[in-house]
Amino acid sequence: MPKKVDHDARRRQMTDAVCRITLRSGLGSATFRAVAAEAGVSVRLVQHYFGTKQRLLEYTQRHVGERSTARLMGWIEATDGSPRAVLEAFLKSFIPTDEESRVAGLMYLALYTEGVMANAGKGTVRRTESQMMESAVLEQLNRGPLSSGVDPQAEALLLTALMPGLGQYVMNETMTADSAFATIDYHLNRLFAAPYGP
Amino acid sequence: MPKKVDHDARRRQMTDAVCRITLRSGLGSATFRAVAAEAGVSVRLVQHYFGTKQRLLEYTQRHVGERSTARLMGWIEATDGSPRAVLEAFLKSFIPTDEESRVAGLMYLALYTEGVMANAGKGTVRRTESQMMESAVLEQLNRGPLSSGVDPQAEALLLTALMPGLGQYVMNETMTADSAFATIDYHLNRLFAAPYGP
DNA sequence: TTCTTTATAATACAAACGTACCATAAAACG
DNA sequence: CGTTTTATGGTACGTTTGTATTATAAAGAA
């Protein structure tokens, strides 16, 4: 048998190439040939590890998602565990602050758009991610003391819709990451009751 | 000289074809040949009126934008002119409710993504639209009596980032248009002070 | 009518794409 | 050692793309 190789690492090497190319010149430029050249391997090898292009993109999406999740977990574990702090970390993880999170955001936008477009008329869309996000937000909201007049359910929906937009505005430099953070802080301040009463 | 023809109407006929195709099977499927077939004309004619594909997409983006603007103006003129009502109409115009606005939203997403990707590393992005939106929102917020603790500037930023997200969630059927409307109403209620005091 | 300009058409072409096919080297296992 | 399995490479094929080329019909101007 041939030299034993870490398939997952090899795949990651190529999906990383997909990310770099997409970041540089768009998802449409991530062809088999370009990916192979960027990863420093032959075209045949990309075929060997992914077979079809659709699977190449599926793996890319998964890898990007895994990194973002790991990133989020790190942020959350660095908090004191209070509902306000956990929620803040969760929300702020959607704001790109360095190259890695910028790549993740751009890849998500590109792949999400592709998916929405492909299933535009078919009624087959992924709503699991946003639903998971919504329930995670709701869970934290239900823990903490909220200001009067705050509807946790409505706020969870609102925050779930707000975060991608904030992230994208930071990505295309409409606003800085700091002002996105400030916006999150501002809104959370209006949501949570002060420790000594509303 | 040949028969006189309304160039703009002819172009619109073809950009409409681009929209229908994009809605059905993605922007990538909007090739010259597909657009020509969908519009019922020859490929050469599409070339004649747009020359290059980039210009075809530019015109499509402009036409979609014009329709959305007209749609928004109609909504606003149907209000009583109060800051709360104008802002509500403005925000709700981002929620797709019929086929036309659905198309507009999808086209915007597709073309916006294409644009973000193309200029990802170049620092050349269009931030004019969202800045115009932000100042329009701010203008209305500054008119009306706001609840205590509301920062108009921060809220304008927040609403500007929220609307595309809400619109997209309605588009991919994560939520219904009615719950998006309810979310907007809920948030505006927390923003504006009641007529008889906070 | 005749001419000239423009709308429209059919098709050709080079490039790029995803994928299939054929070949080779090397390493684990008997 | 030899065999077999697998990673890897080079390349060819058919399709589709955007665009260029050439040609024709028709309608206003003279």
Image: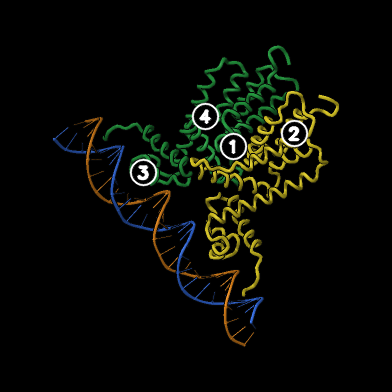
Chain colours: A green, B yellow, C orange, D blue
Amino acid of disc 4: Thr
Q: Chain of mark 1?
A: A
Identify the element where label 2 is drawn.
helix
- Which image quarter is the N terminus of chain A in? top left
Of B72 and C3, the residue lying toward us: C3
Q: Quadrant of residue B75?
A: top right
Amino acid of disc 2: Leu
Q: What label does residue A174 carry, if any?
A: 1
Q: Quadrant of residue C1?
A: bottom right
Q: Chain of mark 2?
A: B
Amino acid of disc 1: Thr
Q: Which residue is mark 4?
A: A97
Identify the element where label 1 is drawn.
loop
Q: CA distance from mark 1 to mark 4?
A: 14 Å
In the rendering, at what x and y percent does residue A122 appear?
Answer: 60, 46
User: Do badges 2 and 4 share one subunit?
Assistant: no
Q: What label does residue A37 carry, if any?
A: 3
| Mark toward the start of the polypeptide (1 vs 3) | 3
User: Is B113 drawn above or below residue B41 in the view shown?
Assistant: above
Q: Of discs 1 and 3, which sits in the foreground?
A: 1
Q: Which residue is mark 2?
A: B141
Q: Residues within 10 Å of mark 1 (few under 14, many from 20)?
A: some
Q: Of discs 4 and 3, which sits in the foreground?
A: 4
Of B92 and B97, the residue lying toward us: B92
In the rendering, at what x and y percent does residue A113 appear?
Answer: 55, 42
Identify the element where label 3 is drawn.
helix
Amino acid of disc 3: Ala
| Mark toward the start of the polypeptide (1 vs 4) | 4
Q: Is residue B79 left or right of residue A144?
A: right
Instruction: Inspect this view and state whether residue A55 appears.
Output: no
In the rendering, at what x and y percent does residue B170 appear?
Answer: 66, 39
